[in-house]
Amino acid sequence: MELGLNGKVALVTASSAGLGKAIAVELASEGAKVVICARGADALEQTRSEISAAGGDVLAVTTDMTEPADIEHVVDETVSGFGRLDILVNNAGDAVIGRTIADADEEWQKIYDVTLWSAVRATRAAVPHLKASGGGNIVNVASVSGHSGLGGMADYNSAKAAMLSLTKTLAQDLAPDNIRVNAVNPALIRTPLWERMAQDVFVPDLGKDVDEVFANLSSQNLLIHRFGRPDEVSGIVAMLASERSSFVTGACWNIDGGFTKFIV
C-alpha cells in the first residue's frame, strides 16, 4: 500500500529503542525523512546507523524529553536539518508497576513529565512548523491503560488518560490548520520497558524468566495469547500519519491483542 510519506519529515520522540525505534524505522522505510531522539547517545547512534544503512534519511539528536529546552532544540534541529516538519510522533513515556496513591508527588511528577508533559511541550513547539508546512499529523502513543486503568499504575494511567483527552481536544483545535491528531493505544507489547517491568516485578511469581512471564500474562489478559511486536504498532502509526488516513482525526486506536475486549 502506498502511504504517500515519501519526502515527508517526521520527528519521533524517544526513538532509540522499543516502539519509538520501530516507528522511526517504519516511517523511514516508507520514504520519510526521520529525526530520532533519546537521552542515551550510544543507543541513539546505533539506531541512526541502522536506519541509514537501510537507505533511510535520518538525523539523530540527543534529547531529554523531560527538559523543555531540549524539546525545543530537537524541533529546531528537525527544521534546520530537513527544512520542514510534517509529522510528530509523541512516544516518550515511562511506567513503574506498584505505585499507590500514597507515593510522593515527586514520583508522580516524574511519570507526568516524561509521559504527558513531553507530548504537550513537543506539540507546542511543533505546531508552528506544521502550520508552515500547510498542515500535518500528530500521533500520540498512548495506552489502553488510559481508558482501562491497570492496578498499581495510577500515575501512568492518569497521564495516558490525559493524553487521550489531549488528542481529542487538539484534533478539534487544530483542524482549521489542516493538522490531524490521533492516538494509538498499545497493550502488552514486547519492548525494553515491558522486559524491565517483567524482570523487576513478575519474576518469579508469574514465571521463572521473562519469556514465561510474558506467556502467562498474555494467556491471562489477551484474546491473542502472545505479546505484541513493536512493528504491529508502527504500521498503524505510519498509516495514521499518512494520506491513507486523510479523513481520520481525533481517533484513538487500540492495538491490544483483544485486551480491552477480554477485560470487559
Image (cartoon, rainbow, N blue to C red):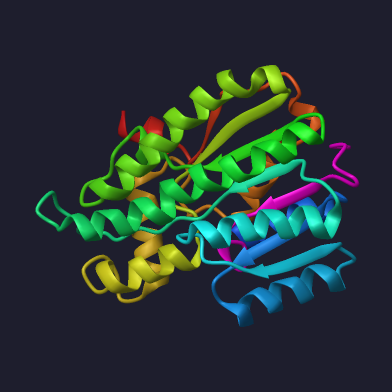
Q: Camera-side residue: 68 or 230? A: 68
Q: Residue at x 21, y 52 (%)?
A: 152
Query: Is 8 contained in the magenta span?
Result: yes
Q: Camera-side residue: 85 or 261? A: 85
**For residue 23, side relative to residue 227 (left or right):** right
Indicate the position of residue 52 as horizontal and vertical percent values: 84, 70
Q: Magenta span: helix, strand or loop, mainly?
A: loop
Query: Is 192 contained in the magenta span?
Result: no
Q: Which residues are magenta?
A: 1-19
Indicate the position of residue 163 as horizontal and vertical percent values: 44, 37
Q: Camera-side residue: 237 or 61? A: 61
Q: Camera-side residue: 166 or 79? A: 79
Can the viewer see residue 1? no
Q: Is residue 222 above or below residue 111?
A: above
Q: Residue furthest bottom?
A: 42
Q: Is residue 134 above or below residue 198?
A: above
Q: Residue at x 50, y 24 (%)?
A: 168
The image quarter containing residue 1 is top right
The image quarter containing residue 249 is top right
**For residue 223, side relative to residue 176 (left or right):** left
